Image: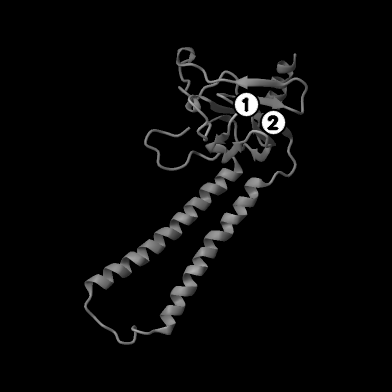
Amino acid sequence: MPNWGQVMFQDAASSVMFQLISFHDHALLVLTLVLTVVGYALVALMLNKHVNRYIMEAQTIETVWTILPALILLVLALPSLRILYITDEVSQPSITVKTIGHQWYWSYEYTDFMNVEMDSYMLPTSDLLPGDYRLLEVDNRMVVPMQLEIRMLITAADVIHSWTVPALGVKVDAVPGRLNQIGFTTTQPGIFYGQCSEICGANHSFMPIAVESINTKSFMKWISNFTQ
């Protein structure tokens, strides 16, 4: 969960989100260095009154300020492309969960098991328990086993929604008539919250997402109780 006044990302709960945060820090460092050099050059240019006739036409410096930005762009582009392919990769999923966006709630279907499906509505403020988060708690959380790859199949029944959990680095549009796919692996137990990130109507702000990550033994017990 983010804290009040937090300016950085939430703590990563998946390997993909960890790499996204690392790339963000990497890009921010490069931008800081570039801005520092450019800012120093502008200040030095405005404050000094010297004229050097050899800089009026200097092939060397023109070559440097043409090649150097290209190298900087490569340093940014290559890691970015790597993470882009990682986010779309689904190798060997252990469990498949189908998510359907409705106005204004989510439905989850565990297609590997018989008759395991549920609707997830936001809990009203009057039903919250001490310690619950307003506008984020739901009556049925999506429960997944930790350290196992989960394949999400995401669609919508009416308008475009967006299934988004920042701590997992997941943001996928739910489009009617289209089945989108994404994979993620939680690295630790916990409850990770998200919200619909597509303006989908009057109650767009009231269809939260709660993903509960537990160990495999507890997950199998939860599935067994659900199917009984």
Query: Which of the 4 quarters of the picture holds residue 154?
Result: top right
Question: x%, y% of residue 15?
Answer: 60, 44
Residue at the spot of label 1: 142
Residue 148 in view: no
Q: Which of marks 1 and 2 is nearer the N terminus?
A: 2
Front position in the image: 123 or 26: 123
Camera-side residue of 198 and 20 = 198
Q: Is mark 1 on a helix, strand or loop?
A: strand
Q: How many C-alpha atoms fall within 10 Å of the one at disc 2: few (<14), some, or many (≥20)?
A: many
Q: Which amino acid does label 2 sit on?
A: Val
> Quick check: marks 1 and 2 in contact, CB under 8 Å?
yes
Tell me the kind of residue under disc 1.
Answer: Met
The image position of residue 60, as x and y in percent, is 43, 82
Whether residue 182 can be seen here? yes
Picture residue at 53% right of the left edge, 25% below the top: 207
At horizontal 64% and vertical 33% (from top left) the residue drawn is: 176
Q: Residue at x 49, y 51 (%)?
A: 24
Residue at position x 48%, y 56% in the image: 27
Q: Residue 47 carries which label?
A: none
The residue indicated by pointer 2 is 97
* As drawn, 140 above or below 7: above
Task: List x then y, in percent, for residue 213.
Answer: 62, 29
Image vertical order of residue 50 relative to residue 147, above or below:
below
Q: What kind of element bears circle 2?
A: strand
Disc 1 to disc 2, how far (Cα)? Answer: 9 Å
Tell me: residue 132, above or below residue 27.
above
Q: Quadrant of residue 191?
A: top right
